[in-house]
Amino acid sequence: MKANRWAPWLVFLAGSAYFIIPLLATFEFSLRMRRGTYSFDAYASVFADPRFHASFGYSVVIGLVTIVVGILVVVPAVYYVRLRMPWLRPFMEFITLLPLVIPALVLVYGYIRLYNSSSLVPFTGSALGTDILLTCAYVTLALPYMYRAVDNGMRSIDIGTLTEAAQIMGANQVQIIGQIILPNILVAILSGAFLTFAIVIGEFTIASLLNRPAFGPYLVGIGTNRAYEPAALAIISFIITWGAMGMINVLGRFAPRTSARTD
Amino acid sequence: MTDNTAPPMRSSRRIPWDGLAVAPFIIFAVMFLFLPTLGLVGAAFTDRAGKFTFDNIIGLGADQIVAAYWISIRISGASAILGALIGLAITLAIIRGRLPGWLRSAFMTFSGVASNFAGVPLAFAFIATLGRLGLVTIVLRFLGFDIYRSGFNLLSFWGLTLTYLYFQIPLMALTIAPAIDGLKKEWNEAAQILGASQWQFWRYVGLPILWPSFLGTLSLLFANAFGAIATAWALTGSNLNIVTVLLYNQIRGDALQNPGLGAALALGMIVITSLANVIYLIVAARAERWMK
């Protein structure tokens, strides 16, 4: 019994060391740019680079559009399938598992073959078309997370009763989804949105193969050319991811818990 | 939408809302999941003239390609098994080990961050840690142990596996935590009342119940590592011979010069990750019986 008391601590501390030491090492490395003393020169150098602003800004815009498109694709579908067509649910679950099964690299290879400039839908024929294709690719990557977040959100409110009540009051379908359902699952949607944002911001494979000036390819470029800036960028990326996850946690506390469960 | 005064049932009959709401989802799935994948499957069995052929599949037998698949499978397998075991140990320690409650929520939040901290920044972090000028490398050398002279290399099998564990362990923790929560305290108490030791409880009750979730997550971790490329690419450039890097080079057009073979490579990857996930689905269905 005595061993049982410190064994969990030992496991926990060893695990924590594995996760904390690389972060400390990265931070320490990022401070070493100026010879002989610690400084934030690497960060200053990163923030002074116009390509940092350009690529980061590009990824933020793509990330926000991805979130909006993802919501428009997922929310109405989950709502109607839950309300009217429950037999479609296993099919939706299967579809939203696929992006976890098919590697992003394989998907983008398929896109390049299918939507090249001489095809029926020449997405890659223009810069704007490629941006749209990139956004759609990210919506697809985010589908598993968006679907599960929205589905969990709808499970926690009684959408059947809410819909009937709204219909009795004379609301139409667009009003029901936009003004009744959406505000009620907003917290769940936002948690899916922040996760999507965290995924899109650092994504490398798809952006690089579609030749778009996103943050991920910029990171790789810096990694091959510089020594200390990559460490600074890793710390910055970690803080961004942390911010997105922190928001999910904070929002989770506002999630509705009181409504009846329908299933 | 046209007239708010009409009875709602009639308005929903006039416009096929159900279909309209689900259509974007279906169109997305068809355009960005099914068609690209089917296109690749078709291309894998087509030669340059557009005729049916097995040549591309046979071409996968080339030494370099078999070696790339093999090292990818080994790295994915090693990082999945180690990640699952270590993740299970840490999660058990945190949930069942009577550690303070705030540690658990802190660890789970961190896992959410770390499981998404894959890709390029992760590679930078490990270069700063275990690279030739990394902090741990320098500290160990200072203590008289040169890991690079004793055969370690960050750009090797074990170096990459060690790096992948950084997102594999948290992913394991996030997916296995609900299953561990499902182990009811009463079962442990019942076992104790019947005279079972802690070891006997885990041997005959705890682990058999966790087993399906464990296997399921294992296959998820495998597929996760198998499809990864950004970390490996940022660590090694195009030097490492894993299958994702090989396919990436093929798509960029500076390697195999044969689109049919590229499609066959992709098909091989889909087959392997699908196998892993079929196991996951079967096992997860079994696991759910205990989660009620």
Image (cartoon, rainbow, N blue to C red):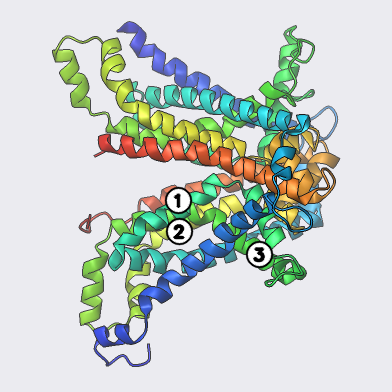
Q: Earlier in the sequence, mark 1 or mark 2?
A: 2
Residue visible at 74% across and 8% down? B145
Q: Which mark is residue A190?
A: 2
Q: Which mark is residue A248?
A: 1
Residue highlighted by disc 3: A133
Is any part of residue B21 visible from this angle? yes
Is any part of residue A44 visible from this angle? no
Cα–Cα gap, marks 2 and 3: 23 Å
Are there few (<14), some (14-19), or many (20+) residues within 10 Å of tag 3?
Answer: many
Q: What is the x, y in percent for residue A118?
A: 76, 70
Q: Earlier in the sequence, mark 1 or mark 3?
A: 3
Name the residue nearer the viewer: B20 or A159. Answer: B20
Q: Chain of mark 1?
A: A
Q: Which mark is residue B69?
A: none
Which image quadrant is residue B103 in? top left
* Kind of residue at disc 3: Leu
Name the residue nearer the viewer: B86 or A52. Answer: B86
Are there few (<14), some (14-19), or many (20+) residues within 10 Å of tag 2?
Answer: many
* Kind of residue at disc 2: Leu
Element class at badge 2: helix
